[in-house]
Image: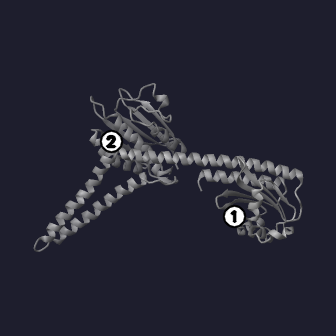
Protein backbone atom coordinates (compact mmCIF):
# COMPACT_ATOMS: atom_id res chain seq x y z
CA UNK A 1 0.00 0.00 0.00
CA UNK A 2 1.42 3.39 -1.07
CA UNK A 3 1.98 6.31 1.28
CA UNK A 4 -1.12 8.20 0.05
CA UNK A 5 -3.32 5.11 0.46
CA UNK A 6 -1.99 4.57 3.99
CA UNK A 7 -2.76 8.19 4.90
CA UNK A 8 -6.31 7.85 3.57
CA UNK A 9 -6.79 4.62 5.52
CA UNK A 10 -5.53 6.30 8.71
CA UNK A 11 -7.93 9.22 8.22
CA UNK A 12 -10.90 6.89 7.76
CA UNK A 13 -10.03 4.78 10.78
CA UNK A 14 -9.32 7.80 13.02
CA UNK A 15 -12.69 9.29 12.13
CA UNK A 16 -14.51 6.02 12.83
CA UNK A 17 -12.57 5.47 16.07
CA UNK A 18 -13.56 8.91 17.34
CA UNK A 19 -17.19 8.58 16.29
CA UNK A 20 -17.53 5.08 17.77
CA UNK A 21 -15.95 6.15 21.07
CA UNK A 22 -17.73 9.48 21.59
CA UNK A 23 -21.15 8.12 20.58
CA UNK A 24 -20.65 5.03 22.75
CA UNK A 25 -21.19 2.59 19.88
CA UNK A 26 -19.80 -0.93 19.61
CA UNK A 27 -18.95 -0.70 15.90
CA UNK A 28 -18.65 1.91 13.19
CA UNK A 29 -18.58 1.38 9.44
CA UNK A 30 -17.86 3.43 6.31
CA UNK A 31 -19.07 2.55 2.84
CA UNK A 32 -18.26 4.48 -0.33
CA UNK A 33 -20.76 4.78 -3.15
CA UNK A 34 -19.94 3.57 -6.63
CA UNK A 35 -21.98 2.83 -9.74
CA UNK A 36 -22.98 -0.69 -8.67
CA UNK A 37 -23.71 0.05 -5.00
CA UNK A 38 -22.10 0.89 -1.67
CA UNK A 39 -18.74 -0.76 -0.88
CA UNK A 40 -17.40 -1.31 2.65
CA UNK A 41 -14.01 0.37 3.06
CA UNK A 42 -13.51 0.64 6.83
CA UNK A 43 -14.84 -0.95 10.03
CA UNK A 44 -13.78 -0.05 13.57
CA UNK A 45 -14.85 -0.93 17.09
CA UNK A 46 -15.25 -4.10 19.17
CA UNK A 47 -12.63 -6.60 17.87
CA UNK A 48 -15.13 -9.50 17.83
CA UNK A 49 -17.66 -7.43 15.89
CA UNK A 50 -14.97 -6.18 13.50
CA UNK A 51 -14.00 -9.80 12.89
CA UNK A 52 -17.65 -10.66 12.24
CA UNK A 53 -17.84 -7.74 9.83
CA UNK A 54 -15.64 -9.68 7.40
CA UNK A 55 -18.72 -11.78 6.68
CA UNK A 56 -20.83 -8.72 5.86
CA UNK A 57 -21.50 -8.22 2.12
CA UNK A 58 -18.60 -6.09 0.82
CA UNK A 59 -20.87 -4.46 -1.76
CA UNK A 60 -24.58 -3.85 -1.25
CA UNK A 61 -26.86 -2.77 -4.07
CA UNK A 62 -28.52 0.61 -4.10
CA UNK A 63 -31.93 -1.11 -3.89
CA UNK A 64 -30.93 -2.88 -0.68
CA UNK A 65 -32.07 -1.99 2.85
CA UNK A 66 -28.99 0.18 3.40
CA UNK A 67 -29.28 1.68 -0.08
CA UNK A 68 -32.85 2.73 0.60
CA UNK A 69 -31.79 4.38 3.85
CA UNK A 70 -29.07 6.29 1.99
CA UNK A 71 -31.49 7.30 -0.78
CA UNK A 72 -33.59 9.15 1.80
CA UNK A 73 -30.61 11.50 2.25
CA UNK A 74 -31.56 11.78 5.92
CA UNK A 75 -30.06 10.30 9.11
CA UNK A 76 -31.92 7.12 10.11
CA UNK A 77 -32.06 5.93 13.70
CA UNK A 78 -33.16 2.31 14.19
CA UNK A 79 -33.74 1.51 17.89
CA UNK A 80 -34.14 -2.24 17.25
CA UNK A 81 -33.14 -4.04 14.06
CA UNK A 82 -35.12 -7.14 15.02
CA UNK A 83 -38.33 -5.10 14.86
CA UNK A 84 -37.86 -4.59 11.11
CA UNK A 85 -39.46 -7.90 10.17
CA UNK A 86 -40.37 -6.75 6.69
CA UNK A 87 -36.73 -6.07 5.79
CA UNK A 88 -35.21 -9.16 7.39
CA UNK A 89 -34.67 -10.72 3.94
CA UNK A 90 -31.97 -8.18 3.20
CA UNK A 91 -28.57 -9.93 3.34
CA UNK A 92 -26.78 -7.08 5.10
CA UNK A 93 -29.48 -6.61 7.74
CA UNK A 94 -29.53 -10.36 8.41
CA UNK A 95 -25.71 -10.31 8.73
CA UNK A 96 -25.90 -7.40 11.20
CA UNK A 97 -28.49 -9.17 13.35
CA UNK A 98 -26.62 -12.47 13.22
CA UNK A 99 -23.48 -10.64 14.38
CA UNK A 100 -25.39 -9.45 17.42
CA UNK A 101 -26.18 -5.87 16.43
CA UNK A 102 -29.49 -4.49 17.69
CA UNK A 103 -29.46 -0.67 17.51
CA UNK A 104 -28.18 1.33 14.55
CA UNK A 105 -27.62 4.82 13.26
CA UNK A 106 -27.07 5.43 9.54
CA UNK A 107 -26.11 8.77 7.99
CA UNK A 108 -25.68 9.30 4.22
CA UNK A 109 -22.65 11.32 3.14
CA UNK A 110 -23.76 13.99 0.67
CA UNK A 111 -21.77 16.19 -1.71
CA UNK A 112 -23.99 18.66 -3.57
CA UNK A 113 -26.92 16.39 -2.64
CA UNK A 114 -25.18 13.43 -4.30
CA UNK A 115 -24.65 10.33 -2.17
CA UNK A 116 -20.90 9.70 -1.93
CA UNK A 117 -20.96 7.25 0.97
CA UNK A 118 -22.65 5.96 4.10
CA UNK A 119 -21.36 6.06 7.66
CA UNK A 120 -23.03 3.94 10.34
CA UNK A 121 -22.85 3.05 14.03
CA UNK A 122 -24.15 -0.04 15.80
CA UNK A 123 -24.77 -1.30 19.33
CA UNK A 124 -25.04 -4.87 20.56
CA UNK A 125 -27.92 -4.03 22.89
CA UNK A 126 -31.23 -2.33 22.25
CA UNK A 127 -30.10 1.06 23.45
CA UNK A 128 -31.27 3.98 21.27
CA UNK A 129 -28.84 6.82 20.58
CA UNK A 130 -29.61 10.14 22.26
CA UNK A 131 -30.39 13.31 20.33
CA UNK A 132 -27.02 14.68 21.40
CA UNK A 133 -25.21 11.57 20.08
CA UNK A 134 -27.13 11.73 16.80
CA UNK A 135 -26.21 15.41 16.38
CA UNK A 136 -22.57 14.63 17.18
CA UNK A 137 -22.54 11.79 14.66
CA UNK A 138 -23.98 14.06 11.97
CA UNK A 139 -21.03 16.37 12.60
CA UNK A 140 -18.69 13.41 12.11
CA UNK A 141 -20.50 12.59 8.86
CA UNK A 142 -19.91 16.15 7.63
CA UNK A 143 -16.20 15.79 8.47
CA UNK A 144 -16.12 12.46 6.64
CA UNK A 145 -17.63 14.07 3.53
CA UNK A 146 -14.97 16.80 3.58
CA UNK A 147 -12.21 14.18 4.03
CA UNK A 148 -13.57 12.07 1.16
CA UNK A 149 -13.78 15.10 -1.13
CA UNK A 150 -10.19 16.01 -0.24
CA UNK A 151 -9.11 12.43 -1.01
CA UNK A 152 -10.97 12.52 -4.34
CA UNK A 153 -9.27 15.76 -5.33
CA UNK A 154 -5.85 14.36 -4.35
CA UNK A 155 -6.53 11.27 -6.46
CA UNK A 156 -7.61 13.37 -9.45
CA UNK A 157 -4.49 15.52 -9.08
CA UNK A 158 -2.24 12.45 -9.00
CA UNK A 159 -4.02 10.98 -12.03
CA UNK A 160 -3.59 14.25 -13.92
CA UNK A 161 0.11 14.34 -13.03
CA UNK A 162 0.47 10.74 -14.20
CA UNK A 163 -1.26 11.55 -17.50
CA UNK A 164 0.99 14.56 -18.09
CA UNK A 165 4.11 12.59 -17.20
CA UNK A 166 3.15 9.82 -19.63
CA UNK A 167 2.41 12.32 -22.42
CA UNK A 168 5.75 13.99 -21.77
CA UNK A 169 7.58 10.64 -21.98
CA UNK A 170 5.89 9.76 -25.27
CA UNK A 171 6.66 13.22 -26.70
CA UNK A 172 10.30 12.97 -25.65
CA UNK A 173 10.63 9.50 -27.12
CA UNK A 174 9.07 10.85 -30.32
CA UNK A 175 11.94 13.33 -30.60
CA UNK A 176 14.37 10.41 -30.45
CA UNK A 177 12.68 8.31 -33.16
CA UNK A 178 15.57 8.56 -35.62
CA UNK A 179 18.16 7.70 -32.96
CA UNK A 180 16.10 4.81 -31.60
CA UNK A 181 15.65 3.45 -35.14
CA UNK A 182 19.42 3.62 -35.63
CA UNK A 183 20.03 1.82 -32.33
CA UNK A 184 17.56 -0.93 -33.26
CA UNK A 185 19.13 -1.37 -36.70
CA UNK A 186 22.54 -2.16 -35.21
CA UNK A 187 21.67 -5.51 -33.50
CA UNK A 188 19.28 -6.43 -36.32
CA UNK A 189 21.96 -5.77 -38.93
CA UNK A 190 24.51 -7.70 -36.88
CA UNK A 191 22.15 -10.68 -36.53
CA UNK A 192 21.58 -10.72 -40.31
CA UNK A 193 25.34 -10.62 -40.95
CA UNK A 194 25.97 -13.47 -38.49
CA UNK A 195 23.18 -15.52 -40.08
CA UNK A 196 24.57 -14.97 -43.58
CA UNK A 197 28.02 -16.02 -42.38
CA UNK A 198 26.60 -19.14 -40.72
CA UNK A 199 24.83 -20.10 -43.96
CA UNK A 200 28.10 -19.77 -45.91
CA UNK A 201 29.94 -21.97 -43.41
CA UNK A 202 27.08 -24.46 -43.55
CA UNK A 203 27.22 -24.59 -47.38
CA UNK A 204 30.86 -25.64 -47.43
CA UNK A 205 31.81 -29.25 -47.99
CA UNK A 206 32.28 -30.43 -45.38
CA UNK A 207 30.28 -27.86 -43.39
CA UNK A 208 32.32 -25.88 -40.87
CA UNK A 209 30.03 -26.58 -37.93
CA UNK A 210 32.15 -24.85 -35.29
CA UNK A 211 31.92 -21.56 -37.18
CA UNK A 212 28.19 -22.14 -37.65
CA UNK A 213 27.79 -22.68 -33.90
CA UNK A 214 29.70 -19.45 -33.14
CA UNK A 215 27.53 -17.57 -35.62
CA UNK A 216 24.33 -18.88 -34.01
CA UNK A 217 25.59 -17.92 -30.55
CA UNK A 218 26.30 -14.42 -31.84
CA UNK A 219 22.77 -14.23 -33.27
CA UNK A 220 21.32 -15.22 -29.89
CA UNK A 221 23.42 -12.58 -28.14
CA UNK A 222 22.42 -9.79 -30.55
CA UNK A 223 18.79 -10.92 -30.30
CA UNK A 224 18.94 -10.52 -26.53
CA UNK A 225 20.47 -7.08 -27.01
CA UNK A 226 17.64 -6.04 -29.33
CA UNK A 227 15.13 -7.41 -26.82
CA UNK A 228 16.67 -5.32 -24.05
CA UNK A 229 16.32 -2.19 -26.19
CA UNK A 230 12.66 -2.98 -26.85
CA UNK A 231 12.09 -3.58 -23.11
CA UNK A 232 13.66 -0.23 -22.23
CA UNK A 233 11.52 1.54 -24.80
CA UNK A 234 8.41 -0.27 -23.65
CA UNK A 235 8.90 0.62 -20.00
CA UNK A 236 9.32 4.30 -20.88
CA UNK A 237 6.37 4.50 -23.28
CA UNK A 238 3.74 2.32 -21.63
CA UNK A 239 1.22 3.81 -19.27
CA UNK A 240 1.48 2.25 -15.82
CA UNK A 241 0.75 3.36 -12.25
CA UNK A 242 3.76 4.54 -10.22
CA UNK A 243 5.55 1.81 -8.31
CA UNK A 244 8.07 1.97 -5.52
CA UNK A 245 11.10 -0.28 -5.72
CA UNK A 246 14.82 -0.26 -5.03
CA UNK A 247 16.49 1.53 -7.94
CA UNK A 248 20.10 1.23 -9.06
CA UNK A 249 20.57 4.80 -10.31
CA UNK A 250 23.82 4.02 -12.14
CA UNK A 251 22.14 1.30 -14.20
CA UNK A 252 19.10 3.52 -14.82
CA UNK A 253 21.33 6.38 -16.03
CA UNK A 254 23.34 4.10 -18.34
CA UNK A 255 20.12 2.88 -19.96
CA UNK A 256 19.15 6.48 -20.71
CA UNK A 257 22.57 7.27 -22.18
CA UNK A 258 22.26 4.18 -24.39
CA UNK A 259 18.91 5.44 -25.71
CA UNK A 260 20.21 8.95 -26.34
CA UNK A 261 23.73 8.11 -27.53
CA UNK A 262 22.85 8.12 -31.23
CA UNK A 263 21.00 11.44 -30.90
CA UNK A 264 24.04 12.97 -29.23
CA UNK A 265 26.39 11.66 -31.91
CA UNK A 266 24.08 12.93 -34.68
CA UNK A 267 24.21 16.41 -33.14
CA UNK A 268 27.98 16.26 -32.69
CA UNK A 269 27.74 16.03 -28.92
CA UNK A 270 30.34 14.09 -26.94
CA UNK A 271 28.69 12.37 -24.02
CA UNK A 272 30.64 11.34 -20.93
CA UNK A 273 29.67 9.82 -17.60
CA UNK A 274 31.29 9.77 -14.19
CA UNK A 275 29.24 7.49 -11.97
CA UNK A 276 30.54 6.76 -8.49
CA UNK A 277 30.76 3.01 -7.84
CA UNK A 278 28.52 1.48 -5.18
CA UNK A 279 26.07 4.34 -5.01
CA UNK A 280 23.48 4.00 -2.24
CA UNK A 281 20.29 2.38 -3.50
CA UNK A 282 17.25 4.64 -3.60
CA UNK A 283 13.56 3.87 -3.31
CA UNK A 284 11.38 5.10 -6.13
CA UNK A 285 9.79 4.57 -9.51
CA UNK A 286 12.53 3.61 -11.97
CA UNK A 287 10.61 4.79 -15.05
CA UNK A 288 9.84 8.19 -13.53
CA UNK A 289 13.47 8.74 -12.50
CA UNK A 290 14.59 7.74 -16.00
CA UNK A 291 12.05 10.20 -17.39
CA UNK A 292 13.78 12.99 -15.45
CA UNK A 293 17.17 11.91 -16.82
CA UNK A 294 15.77 11.60 -20.34
CA UNK A 295 14.34 15.12 -20.23
CA UNK A 296 17.54 16.64 -18.87
CA UNK A 297 19.76 14.83 -21.38
CA UNK A 298 17.56 15.63 -24.40
CA UNK A 299 17.31 19.28 -23.31
CA UNK A 300 21.11 19.44 -22.99
CA UNK A 301 21.64 17.93 -26.45
CA UNK A 302 19.14 20.35 -27.99
CA UNK A 303 20.75 23.32 -26.25
CA UNK A 304 24.05 22.53 -27.98
CA UNK A 305 22.64 21.90 -31.46
CA UNK A 306 23.21 25.54 -32.48
CA UNK A 307 26.66 25.90 -30.89
CA UNK A 308 29.19 26.62 -33.65
CA UNK A 309 32.29 27.68 -31.76
CA UNK A 310 33.80 25.30 -29.23
CA UNK A 311 33.11 21.75 -28.23
CA UNK A 312 29.69 20.28 -27.62
CA UNK A 313 30.12 18.28 -24.45
CA UNK A 314 27.57 16.62 -22.21
CA UNK A 315 28.72 15.34 -18.84
CA UNK A 316 26.61 13.21 -16.50
CA UNK A 317 27.73 12.41 -12.97
CA UNK A 318 26.30 10.67 -9.94
CA UNK A 319 27.84 10.86 -6.47
CA UNK A 320 26.94 9.91 -2.94
CA UNK A 321 26.41 12.92 -0.66
CA UNK A 322 25.60 13.32 3.00
CA UNK A 323 22.99 13.57 4.33
CA UNK A 324 20.82 13.78 1.17
CA UNK A 325 21.78 10.43 -0.38
CA UNK A 326 22.61 10.67 -4.11
CA UNK A 327 23.20 13.70 -6.32
CA UNK A 328 22.92 13.43 -10.12
CA UNK A 329 24.22 16.25 -12.34
CA UNK A 330 23.79 16.93 -16.08
CA UNK A 331 26.11 19.61 -17.47
CA UNK A 332 26.30 20.91 -21.04
CA UNK A 333 28.33 23.46 -23.00
CA UNK A 334 25.37 25.08 -24.72
CA UNK A 335 24.51 28.77 -24.77
CA UNK A 336 23.50 28.59 -21.12
CA UNK A 337 20.60 30.02 -19.16
CA UNK A 338 19.58 33.65 -19.14
CA UNK A 339 19.52 35.16 -15.62
CA UNK A 340 15.87 36.18 -16.04
CA UNK A 341 14.93 32.58 -16.96
CA UNK A 342 16.38 30.90 -13.88
CA UNK A 343 13.56 31.76 -11.43
CA UNK A 344 10.89 30.52 -13.88
CA UNK A 345 12.51 27.44 -15.44
CA UNK A 346 10.35 24.96 -13.52
CA UNK A 347 7.07 26.83 -13.84
CA UNK A 348 4.33 25.03 -15.83
CA UNK A 349 4.05 26.29 -19.43
CA UNK A 350 7.21 28.40 -19.22
CA UNK A 351 9.62 27.56 -22.02
CA UNK A 352 12.66 29.01 -23.74
CA UNK A 353 12.13 26.85 -26.87
CA UNK A 354 10.22 28.19 -29.88
CA UNK A 355 8.23 24.95 -30.17
CA UNK A 356 8.27 23.93 -26.48
CA UNK A 357 5.21 23.34 -24.28
CA UNK A 358 6.92 24.23 -21.02
CA UNK A 359 5.87 21.08 -19.15
CA UNK A 360 9.02 18.92 -19.18
CA UNK A 361 10.98 20.60 -16.39
CA UNK A 362 7.84 21.21 -14.32
CA UNK A 363 7.02 17.48 -14.48
CA UNK A 364 10.64 16.62 -13.64
CA UNK A 365 10.56 18.77 -10.51
CA UNK A 366 7.23 17.20 -9.43
CA UNK A 367 8.71 13.71 -9.87
CA UNK A 368 11.85 14.50 -7.89
CA UNK A 369 9.91 16.21 -5.09
CA UNK A 370 7.53 13.24 -4.93
CA UNK A 371 10.65 11.11 -4.32
CA UNK A 372 11.66 13.39 -1.44
CA UNK A 373 14.42 15.10 -3.40
CA UNK A 374 15.22 18.47 -4.95
CA UNK A 375 15.87 19.63 -8.55
CA UNK A 376 17.55 22.92 -9.44
CA UNK A 377 19.53 24.61 -12.21
CA UNK A 378 22.52 26.93 -12.43
CA UNK A 379 24.50 28.80 -15.06
CA UNK A 380 28.01 27.63 -15.92
CA UNK A 381 31.01 29.74 -16.84
CA UNK A 382 32.13 30.51 -19.45
CA UNK A 383 28.96 28.94 -20.89
CA UNK A 384 26.53 26.09 -20.47
CA UNK A 385 23.98 24.95 -17.91
CA UNK A 386 24.05 22.60 -14.95
CA UNK A 387 20.98 20.71 -13.74
CA UNK A 388 21.21 18.72 -10.51
CA UNK A 389 18.83 16.66 -8.42
CA UNK A 390 19.11 14.77 -5.16
CA UNK A 391 17.34 11.59 -4.08
CA UNK A 392 17.33 10.34 -0.47
CA UNK A 393 19.14 7.05 0.07
CA UNK A 394 17.05 4.01 0.93
Residue 9: % across, % down? 67, 54
Q: Residue furthest left?
A: 205
Q: CA distance from mark 2 to mark 1?
A: 62 Å
Question: In this rendering, is residue 185 above or below 315?
Answer: below
Decide which of 382, 220 is in the foreground and name it: 220
Residue in the picture at 34% in, 49% down: 258
Give neighbour class at mark 1: few <14, some 14-19, many 20+ (Cα, 10 Å): some
Decide which of 259, 210 is in the foreground and name it: 259
Give neighbour class at mark 2: few <14, some 14-19, many 20+ (Cα, 10 Å): few
Q: Is residue 368 left or right of residue 9?
A: left
Q: Secondary structure at mark 2?
A: strand
Q: Secondary structure at mark 1?
A: loop
Q: Is residue 31 left or right of residue 238?
A: right
Instruction: Tell which circle, 2 or 1, labels the residue nearer the N-terminal end.
Output: 1
Q: Residue furthest top?
A: 340
Quadrant occupied by the N terminus? bottom right
Q: Identify the residue position indicated by label 2 in the image.
A: 272
Residue 51: % across, % down? 73, 67
Q: Is residue 273 left or right of residue 105?
A: left
Decide which of 374, 38 is in the foreground and name it: 38
Q: Identify the residue position indicated by label 1 in the image.
A: 61
Q: Nearer the viewer, mark 2 or mark 1?
A: 1
Residue in the picture at 40% in, 45% down: 171
Residue 378: % across, % down? 44, 31
- In this orientation, does residue 296 appear? yes
Amino acid sequence: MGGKAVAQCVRRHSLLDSATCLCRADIGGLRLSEESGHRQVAVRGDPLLVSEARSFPALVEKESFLGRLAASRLPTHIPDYTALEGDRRDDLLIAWVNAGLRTGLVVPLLKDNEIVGIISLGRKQVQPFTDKQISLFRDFAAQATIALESTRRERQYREMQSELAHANRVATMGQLTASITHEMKQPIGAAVAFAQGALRFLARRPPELEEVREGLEAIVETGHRAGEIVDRLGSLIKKAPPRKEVVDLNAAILEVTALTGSEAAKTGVTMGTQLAPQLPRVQGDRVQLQQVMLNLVVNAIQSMSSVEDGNRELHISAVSIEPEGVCVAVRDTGHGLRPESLPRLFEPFYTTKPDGMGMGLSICRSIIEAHGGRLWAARCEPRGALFQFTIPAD
